Image (cartoon, rainbow, N blue to C red):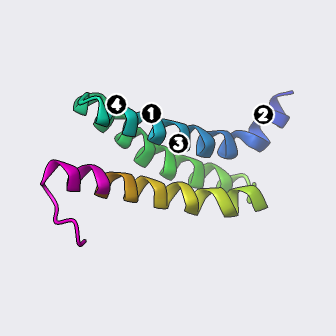
Amino acid sequence: MKKKIKKVLPNIITLSRVIALVIGFILFLKEKIVMSICLYIYGSISDALDGYLARKNNLVTNFGKFMDPLADKLLVCSALICLSSMGKLAAWI
């Protein structure tokens, strides 16, 4: 059982990052900025962690190859949208 969890752990972390970003964006819209920032920080740290685990244990999967870059783009785009709506970043960027 532990081997099975170890095999999918990077994918679970990637999915949790996407879920955290959605929740963080909703919290930002409800003006809970600090909680939103905490989830953004979680997303950044979990990106490094899932990449490390996948490479260390040679667990590179097709799902991970697709979802990890997508989660990264969502992380960056959500941060840019939030900063733009706060007036901290020009919208054209």
Whole-angstrom CA distance, mark 2 to mark 3, is 17 Å
Give the residue pinned by disc 4: 27
Tell me the quarter of the image containing the C terminus: bottom left
Q: Are marks 2 and 3 in contact (CB under 8 Å)?
A: no
Q: Nearer the viewer, residue 4 or 84?
A: 84
Q: How many marks?
A: 4
Instruction: Report the disc number at residue 42.
Output: none
Query: Residue at point 57% right, 53% down?
Result: 52
Query: Dot 3: within a 10 Å radius of its alpha carbon, few (fewer than 14), some, or many (20 or more) residues?
Result: many
Give the residue pinned by disc 1: 23
The image shows residue 71 at horizontal and vertical percentages of 54, 54
Whole-angstrom CA distance, mark 4 to mark 1, is 6 Å
> Residue 65 colored magenta?
no
Q: What range of the chain is rendered magenta?
A: 81-93
Q: Earlier in the sequence, mark 2 or mark 3?
A: 2
Q: Is residue 8 above or below residue 74?
A: above
Q: Are marks 4 and 3 in contact (CB under 8 Å)?
A: no
Secondary structure of residue under mark 3: helix
Q: Earlier in the sequence, mark 2 or mark 4?
A: 2
Whole-angstrom CA distance, mark 2 to mark 1, is 25 Å
Secondary structure of residue under mark 4: helix
Query: Dot 1: within a 10 Å radius of its alpha carbon, few (fewer than 14), some, or many (20 or more) residues?
Result: some
Secondary structure of residue under mark 1: helix
